[in-house]
Amino acid sequence: MALYCIGDIQGCDLALGRLLDEIGFSPSRDTVYLLGDLVNRGPDSAAVLRRCVAVDGALRCLLGNHDLHLLAAAHGARKPSRRDTLASVLEASDRDALLAWVRQQPLARAHEHAGETLLMVHAGVLPAWSSAETLARADEVAAVLRGPDLAGFLQSMYGNTPDQWRDDLTGTDRLRVIVNALTRLRFCSADGIMDFESTESASAAPPGLVPWFDVPGRQTAGTLIAFGHWSTLGWLHRSDLLGLDTGCVWGGCLSAVRFGATLADRELLQVHCEQAQAPGA
C-alpha cells in the first residue's frame, strides 16, 4: 500500500488521469488524498467527480472553496461567474448523484501513518486551533452540509466577517469563520485575524500579515499539514508543511507526494498541465 496527497485539480481530469498513471495508482492497494478544489475553472469537473465516486475510499477527498461554490450554484445560492466551468456537473444527467457525493465530503481529514499524524485541509488552519480542534470544527460544517438545512447554510456562507475565531461564536458566524479558515485562508495577523484580499506569494505578505503557517505559537506546529489553494505559493516543502497547489489549471503542474515508511520520507511526482484559464482573465 502507498499513501499519496494530490493538490488542486480544478476540473482538469485528463491531468489527474495522467498523474494517477504516473504514480501507478491501484485502487485496491493505494490511498490517495485529494486536497480540495476538485472542480471549476478546468474543462471537465464532472469527469473528476465521477472518477472519485468510482473508487470512493481509494481516492479520499476534502472540500475546497470551489467545491462549496458548486453546491451553492446548484442550490441557487450563488450565480456562476463568467470564469466558472460548472456546467458539466450542473447539466449532467447524474447531477443529483454527483452533488450528493460532494456534500458528503469533509473539510479536513487526518491520516495516521507510522505512528504520526498527517492533517489535511484545503487552505489553512487558524493558529489557535489544535489538530483535534481543526477536525472538530470541520465536523461542524460537515454536519450542516449533510443535513436538511443545506440550502439555508449556502445562502449565508459567503462573506468575510467575522474575520477572527472566538470560541463563543454561534450559528452562521461560527460556520462562516470555519469555512473561510479551512477553504480560503492564506494570510492572517499574529492574533489570527484573517485577510482575504491578497493572493500573492508568501514572500509578498501585506503589512502586518504573515502566511497562516508562519504565525508564532501556531498550535499545529510540529504536526505535518498538507494543503492546497495557494497557487502563487506553489510547491512548499518543510518538515511540517506541504503546499501542493502548483497551478494545474493555469498551465502549471498537478503535483502528488508519495510517502514512504514515515511521513518524513517523501517523493514529489508531477505532470505538466495544459492551460485551461489564464490568471487574471
Image (tube, rainbow, N blue to C red):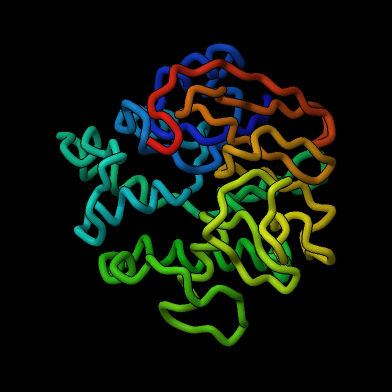
- 76 lies left or right of 63: left
Q: Position of residue 151 (x, y in %)?
A: 26, 65
User: Could you tell me which residue is drawn at 65 percent across and 40 percent down?
Assistant: 233
Residue 108: horizontal and vertical position, in percent? 57, 53
Q: From the image, which quarter does the C terminus lie in? A: top left
Asked if 84 appears above or below 159 in the picture, the reply is above
Q: Nearer the viewer, residue 34 or 110?
A: 34
Question: Residue 235: percent from the left, percent from the top?
Answer: 68, 32
Q: Is residue 266 left or right of residue 81?
A: right
Picture layout, residue 185 above or below residue 266: below
Q: How many marks?
A: 0
* Furthest-front residue in this view: 207
- Quadrant where the N terminus sits is top right
Q: Which residue lies at the image location 63% right of the left edge and 27% below the top edge?
A: 256
- Is residue 162 shown left or right of residue 145? right
Whether residue 128 is visible: yes
Q: Is residue 54 visible?
A: no
**Residue drawn 60% across the image and 75% down it:** 164
Res 148 quadrant in image: bottom left
| Residue depicted at x 78% and y 28% | 266
Q: Position of residue 120 (x, y in %)?
A: 63, 48
Q: Is residue 260 above or below residue 196?
A: above
